[in-house]
Amino acid sequence: MNILKLGLVPQILIGVILGAAVGVFLPGLAAKLGILGLLFVGMLKAVAPLLVLVLVMSAIANKHETGNDGRKTLATILLYLVGTVSAALVALLLSQLFPQTIALTEVAQGSPPVAVSAVLTDVLFKLIDNPVNALLEGNFLGCLTWAILLGVSFRQASDSFKQHLQTVADGVSNIVRYVIRLAPLGIFGLVCYTVATVGLSALAGYASLATLLVAAMLVMALVVNPALVYVITGSNPYPVVFKCLEESGITAFFTRSSAANIPVNLNLARKLGISEELYTVTIPIGATVNMAGAAITITVLTLAAANTLGTDVSFISALLLCVIAALSACGASGVPSGSLLLVPLACSLFGIPLDVAMQVVAVGFIISVIQDSTETALNSSTDVVFTYAVDQWGRQGEES
């Protein structure tokens, strides 16, 4: 069997198994192979800030008009945002009930803020950082600020310029895809080194982390989303929820890409009788901004990193994390595991060093076999669920 012909997920699984075996039986060799993991983390560190800058900037500059049915479209987008923030709150609650830690190869000491005012002050100064310095230092808040400002400014640019901007964004996304293709080797090296130095208990910790992530996503899919739909429509939400999970969620679980699942969602929306004027706009937008699963991933991994470093997370800073996670999730890359590259943005809120944050991202890749598939299934199926809810709400208003 040619391993290279397998998909990324099977390759990652093989990398985890082989890495654990080498770490247990050949610890001396495993310590040397750890450089593969360090190189992988280094490549992620190099591309992540640029990815945030160009993707968000291009998305805003090339944003299309909402169409004729603007009221329902805006209501759907608002529901997307409410759902994403709710997901971050669910992740925060479960992380407080079942706190997680991560076994890192090099646990650097963070610089935890001493007060909420220090958090806010640090955030403000990072927001106004020089764009070049933000890229060089990995300041994701600064990159996000400049991406939004430039994106809004470039909306007035010529169509040809905006097309070139999209070409640049596509080029950076392709680079990210190339880096992610190296994930099996990088993860192999990380698991080798981790098992050799920490032991198999590290893998048990990863399993606990993955379980918490999946549990939070199930709570969103089966409890919070149905509750939101019921509030909007006043009818039993579960038939449409289960239908969307069956036809959209299962497909998205294997494609691991909300963008790739857009044709499936458009066809499902048509079958559900949703207004074509609405779903042809909200489904593509949802594939970009409706990222409840990503918000859960960002929140859980950030809090796990904070727990690992012993950083005290106050109530207000935790709520601020939920907002940052929701905003970060909306800018998540459409590539598989794209949300993991935005974890450092949330980690920077607590003064967690970039080196540690990117190691957390690498751990995220280890559990992405289940995490990213479940995340995409939640994101994609929710696009149709929320569009259906708003369509029913609009029809009830027209009838009354």
Image: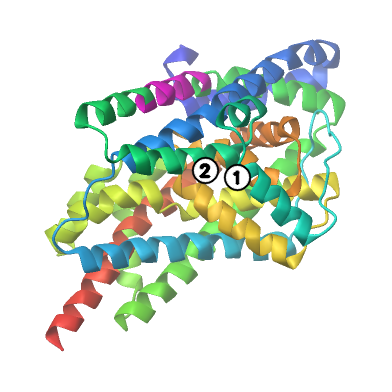
Q: Which mark is residue 145?
A: 2
- The image quarter in which residue 140 lies: top right
Gap in Å between the C-alphas at discs 1 and 2?
6 Å
Quadrant containing the C terminus is bottom left
Which residue: 71% across, 19% down? Answer: 38
Residue at (57, 26) in percent of width and height: 132
Q: Nearer the viewer, residue 79 or 163?
A: 163
Report x, y in % for residue 154.
33, 37
Q: What amino acid is labelled 1 in the image?
A: Leu
Q: Is residue 239 above or below residue 114?
A: below
Question: Could you tell me if residue 287 is visible in this image?
Answer: yes
Tell me the quarter of the picture where residue 345 sits: top right
Instruction: Find residue 387 and report its horizontal and vertical position in percent.
Output: 27, 63
| SS category of the residue bearing label 1 | helix
Task: Point out which mark residue 127 bears.
Answer: 1
Label for residue 5? none
Between 174 and 376, the residue placed more toward the observer is 174
- Left or right placement of residue 371 versus residue 25 in this view: left
148 relative position to 280: left or right: right
When the figure is inspected, residue 211 is found, relative to residue 166, above or below; the finding is below
Q: Is residue 115 left or right of residue 282?
A: right
Dominant secondary structure of the residues highlighted in magenta in the image:
helix
In front: 71, or 83?
71
Coordinates of residue 87 in the picture (x, y in percent): 53, 61
- Residue name at image x 45 percent, y 64 percent: 83
The answer to if 5 sits in the magenta stretch is: no
| Residue 271 visible, this angle | no
Q: Which residues are magenta?
A: 169-179
